[in-house]
């Protein structure tokens, strides 16, 4: 069993991180956390508290440095590993890779080649579980202002970065379908989003 802080400790850590490097990233994490908790409450075998904490921490690498791209994944992994929160460290690494291929990363590769190789190795040896998939899904539903449809969130990413690979988009919709089957409910109804 991996280690995680309790809910209030996780919230305190995120608040402290936001004070170090303010930005919309922290509210994006809070939105993802709430979505993850609601979905987990509707999935047998998933722990809503754990889902919430993993959602809060998925972008925690932004605590280390602002304006980073690929680097926030590795910074988050290192930060959470240093804290002894191995399950959160894992999600920092897996959340950006709905497809296990670093070439599908959206944004700059702002780390040395050997760091990219380390991430490749990690992904190759990690069997994604439902928590990895859940945070990947919630990342694709969460804006700082609150949960939105996947279309709106992916359009937001595309606008900021100039592209969103089709293969990755398709995988996001597969994750939506997977969790709807797990829940036996419509995703947007569960997270409280109006489908337009």
Image (spheres, grey):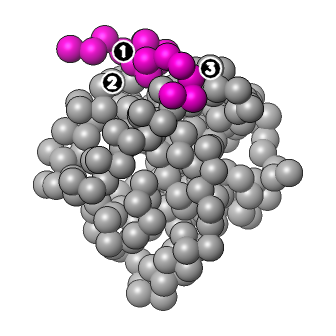
Find the distance from the CA under tag 3 to the CA under tag 2.
19 Å
Rendered residue at 29%/47% (across/down)? 170
Q: Nearer the viewer, residue 150 or 156?
A: 150
Q: Earlier in the sequence, mark 3 or mark 1?
A: 3
> What's the magenta region?
181-196
Q: Is residue 143 visible?
A: yes
Give the percent coordinates (x, y) of residue 174. Answer: 39, 42
Instruction: Classify residue 55 as left or right of residue 194.
Output: right
Find the distance from the CA under tag 2 to the CA under tag 1.
6 Å
Q: Secondary structure at mark 2?
A: loop
Q: Earlier in the sequence, mark 3 or mark 2?
A: 3
Label number found at residue 148: 2
Instruction: Classify residue 36 as left or right of residue 98.
Output: right
Local crowd size for mark 1, using a 10 Å CA cut-off: few (<14), some (14–19), many (≥20): some
Give the percent coordinates (x, y) of residue 56. Answer: 58, 38
Quarter of the C terminus within the rendering = top left
The quadrant holding residue 46 is top right
Q: Residue furthest bottom?
A: 114
Rendered residue at 32%/72% (across/down)? 103
Q: Residue furthest right?
A: 1
Local crowd size for mark 3, using a 10 Å CA cut-off: few (<14), some (14–19), many (≥20): some
Q: Earlier in the sequence, mark 2 or mark 1?
A: 2
* Number of numbered markers: 3
What residue would you read off at disc 1?
Answer: 193
What residue would you read off at disc 3?
Answer: 42
Local crowd size for mark 2, using a 10 Å CA cut-off: few (<14), some (14–19), many (≥20): many
The quadrant holding residue 109 is bottom left
Do the residues under discs 2 and 1 have CB atoms within 8 angstroms? Answer: yes
Q: Secondary structure at mark 3?
A: loop
Find the distance from the CA under tag 3 to the CA under tag 1.
16 Å
Q: Nearer the viewer, residue 110 or 93?
A: 93
């Amino acid at each position: 069993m991996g280690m995680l802080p309790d809910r209030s400790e996780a919230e305190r850590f995120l608040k402290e991180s936001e004070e170090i490097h303010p930005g919309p990233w922290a509210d994006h994490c809070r939105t993802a956390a709430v979505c993850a908790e609601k979905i987990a409450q509707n999935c047998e075998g998933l722990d809503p508290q754990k889902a919430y904490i993993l959602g809060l921490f998925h972008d925690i690498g932004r605590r280390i440095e602002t304006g980073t791209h690929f680097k926030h994944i590795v910074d988050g992994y290192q930060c959470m590993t240093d804290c002894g929160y191995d399950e959160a460290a894992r999600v920092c690494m897996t959340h950006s890779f709905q497809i296990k291929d670093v070439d599908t990363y959206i944004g700059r590769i702002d780390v040395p080649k050997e760091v990219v190789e380390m991430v490749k190795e990690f992904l190759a040896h990690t069997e994604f579980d439902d928590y990895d998939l859940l945070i990947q899904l919630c990342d694709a539903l969460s804006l700082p202002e609150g949960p939105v449809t996947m279309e709106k969130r992916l359009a937001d990413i595309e606008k900021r970065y100039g592209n969103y690979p089709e293969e990755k988009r398709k995988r996001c919709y597969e994750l939506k379908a997977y969790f709807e089957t797990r829940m036996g409910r419509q995703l947007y109804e569960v997270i409280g989003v109006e489908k337009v």
